[in-house]
Image (cartoon, rainbow, N blue to C red):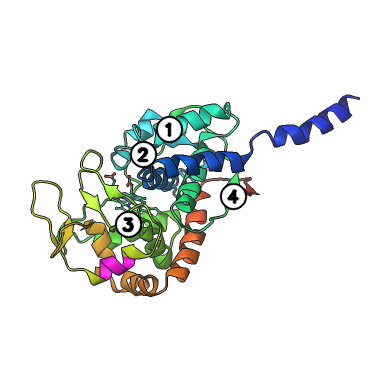
Amino acid sequence: SLGTAVISFWPSFSWAVDYKEVAKDIEDLVRADPDKGPTLVRLAWHSSGTYDQKSKTGGSGQGTIRFAEELAHGGNAGLKDTAVQWLEPIHAKYDGLISYADLYTLAGVAAIHAMGGPVIPWSSGRVDALDASAVTPDGRLPNADSGPPGSDPADAAHVRAIFNRMGFNDQEIVALSGAHALGRCHTTASGYDGPWTPTPTTFNNAYFTILKNLNWVAKEWDGPYQYVNAPGGNLMMLPSDLVLLQDKKFKRYVDIYAGDADKFYKDFAKAFQTLEELGTSGLTLTAWV
Ligand code: ZEM
């Protein structure tokens, strides 16, 4: 009967996308070129970090970061010709059966895993918006350029306002910031320059140990105001990173995560899962590793 046909067809249809296979493709991409890992994590974060819990707009749920309108936002500089493009062949391989919204978030957790980070629970089921009408206004992602200490009354307040809007507290803000163990600033993207740690393709708690233990001075250059370690000059911090030292409530968690890598892994995994589920509904917890 038709009923039996539909019922017997259903399981094979729902298994059409093997997310473990997709995740493996992403991890292979990162292993072939480790520098791609951090940028994939940045794409996952920016695809989610537009969420506003009051209006329930933004977030990772609809894959809107693939639209030119959202990629044109200042904070997304550099993502169009990198992470978004790198994932196109994987999206095409699965013939449209995985949504961009799922692919971008899966890329975040798979890249973190490929770089030695924790297995972060991931859920599938995001449904892509068909047009750009769900793109949120520019300005929802945090600014890095809060300026020299004391020059901007909105330093810590800005960081808190942005992350509280998504629903995150101080502890979660600091845990998530530990992602800056990964990757670097590109003068061609944000205008800033340099990596935060000497191990930018390895997930670890070095962001916190380096932030609190090195001496940070203003970089002397024509570029945007940022910090470099002195002596050395090989590493960098954004003004928004230094806020985590300057604000006593943030600093408390910097100390905790610098001293306890396991706790950082655990807290990061929980907060990153939450981040990737902002603005979603009806997801299914999915084995991907
Ligand atoms: Zn970042 N981030 N970020 N971030 N970020 C950059 C790079 C990366 C801020 C920010 O302005 C910048 C979080 C929080 C905040 C990553 C992950 C996460 C860059 C450099 C800037 C300017 C971009 C470039 O030039 O290519 C600010 C102001 C933040 C909060 C106050 C959170 C939260 C993250 C994840 C959980 C990652 C992985 C990168 C490295 C990207 C790459 O291509 O190497």
Q: Does the magenta stretch include residue 211?
A: yes
Work out whether mark 3 precedes mark 2 in sequence or the reverse, and give the earlier one.
2
**Residue 151: where, in percent of width, then height?**
14, 60
- Up/down of 289 relative to 160, above or below: above
* Secondary element at image label 3: loop
Q: How crowded is mark 2: few (under 14 residues within 10 Å), some or many (20 or more)?
A: few
Work out whether mark 1 precedes mark 4 in sequence or the reverse, and give the earlier one.
1
Viewer-nearest residue: 198 or 145: 198
Q: Locate residue 127: give its quadrant.
A: top right
Work out whether mark 2 precedes mark 1 in sequence or the reverse, and give the earlier one.
1
Residue matched to label 3: 199
Residue matched to label 4: 289
Query: What amino acid does circle 1 point to?
Result: Arg
Q: Distance between the residues labelled 3 and 2?
A: 35 Å
Front disc: 2 or 4: 4
* Residue at figure coordinates x 48%, y 36% from the top left: 63
Work out whether mark 3 precedes mark 4 in sequence or the reverse, and give the earlier one.
3
* Secondary element at image label 4: loop
Numbered label attached to residue 137: 2
Residue matched to label 1: 66
Magenta stretch bounds: 208-212
Work out whether mark 2 precedes mark 4 in sequence or the reverse, and give the earlier one.
2
* Residue at figure coordinates x 77%, y 36% from the top left: 11
